[in-house]
Image: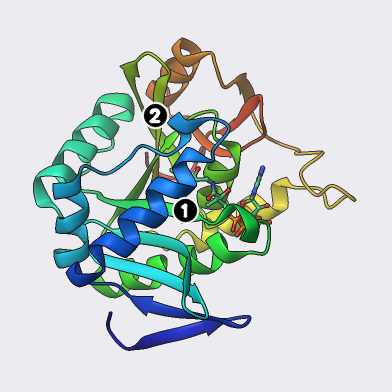
Amino acid sequence: MYSKQSTFKNYNLYQMEKEDFTLVKDFLDRQREKLDRIEFFYPYKDSELAEVLDKGYFLGLFDGQKLIATFAIDYDEEYAKQIADIINSSCDIGLDRAYESSGLMVDEDYRGQGIAGFLMDKICVEASRKNINICGVVQICNAASMNTFFSRGFELRGLYSMGGVYDFGYLLRRAENTNLQNMENFSKLILQSPSKYDIIVDVEREVSNSDIATQRRMLAEGYYGIHCDKKRIFYIRDKERKL
Ligand SMILES: CC(C)(COP(=O)(O)OP(=O)(O)OC[C@H]1O[C@@H](n2cnc3c(N)ncnc32)[C@H](O)[C@@H]1OP(=O)(O)O)[C@@H](O)C(=O)NCCC(=O)NCCS
């Protein structure tokens, strides 16, 4: 483990390294087994985890000695090109590379406190520092994870169906667009209400998250996802901005 990066509440953030393999693997395996929908966290192969710990940017948040959350950027170049290809085949935006932001997991006892949002902010700072595109690959029905990305201005720009239960959304944060403008637009779209996401105005289309065919068509037409709930994805299309 490298030196402490920062703190959140009473928790300490560290950058993890290859010596932390067993600690991280045990944490991810244990938490994944507890998920109601195990497919919501697609596991790393051992070799992939070792690689991200060694060469990527891998964050771990600790409550005392206990690892309670993880999130990373995978700097694998080949994979970054594959992700760009999948996004380009969905919406043809001429992307060169998008590095996966992977390994997002918060211990079930610690969810709903803003921890994922905190880690997401750190990952975004790192991506901005390196001037790279990053992309979350998320099960399209995993509203908690999708909204963690959406809450930081990521856009749903690609879809890939692996078969079976696996329909992945590709949530992109582009280097050249810090998404501040997008976040401003987004906040304009949301009417603050007791449940702040109850009413979304000006969203052009909402689509059932199981209707992959319609979502594909919309992405190809220049729509992109900006928010979701358990059943729907909300799409807008920016008329002024170049696709
Ligand atoms: C997804 C996960 C990491 C979120 O962690 P968390 O610490 O509870 O999330 P936060 O409290 O930081 O919330 C982040 C954002 O997501 C939203 N969110 C969190 N849980 C949500 C839920 N169940 N439904 C809808 N939105 C949710 C929050 O409202 C917040 O947005 P806001 O900042 O605009 O209010 C956590 O639920 C988890 O570990 N899930 C299991 C593993 C998993 O699915 N990983 C993702 C793999 S791609």
Left or right side of 134 for 111: right
The residue at the point 49 percent across, 13 percent down is 214
Residue at image coords 88%, 49%: 193
The numbered dot on residue 30 is none
Q: In the rendered structure, are the residues bearing label 2 and label 1 in contact, judged by CB atoms less than 8 Å apart?
A: no
Check residue 168 in the rendering and tell me which mark sits there, or answer none: 2
Above or below: residue 58 compared with residue 140? below
Say whether residue 199 is left or right of residue 59.
right
Q: Residue at x 22, y 39 (%)?
A: 84
Which quadrant would the N terminus be assigned to in this image? bottom left
Q: Which residue is mark 1?
A: 105
x, y percentage for residue 212? 47, 15
Q: Earlier in the sequence, mark 2 or mark 1?
A: 1
Three-letter code, disc 1? Met
- Please give the name of the residue rendered at 39% of the width and 29% of the height, measured from the top-left corner: 168
Residue 55 image point, x, y percent: 14, 65
Looking at numbered disc 2 in the image, what kind of residue is underneath it?
Phe
Q: In the image, residue 39 lies at what x, y percent? A: 44, 30
- Nearest the camera: 86 or 113? 113
| Disc 1: residue Cβ within 8 A of ligand 1's nearest atom | yes
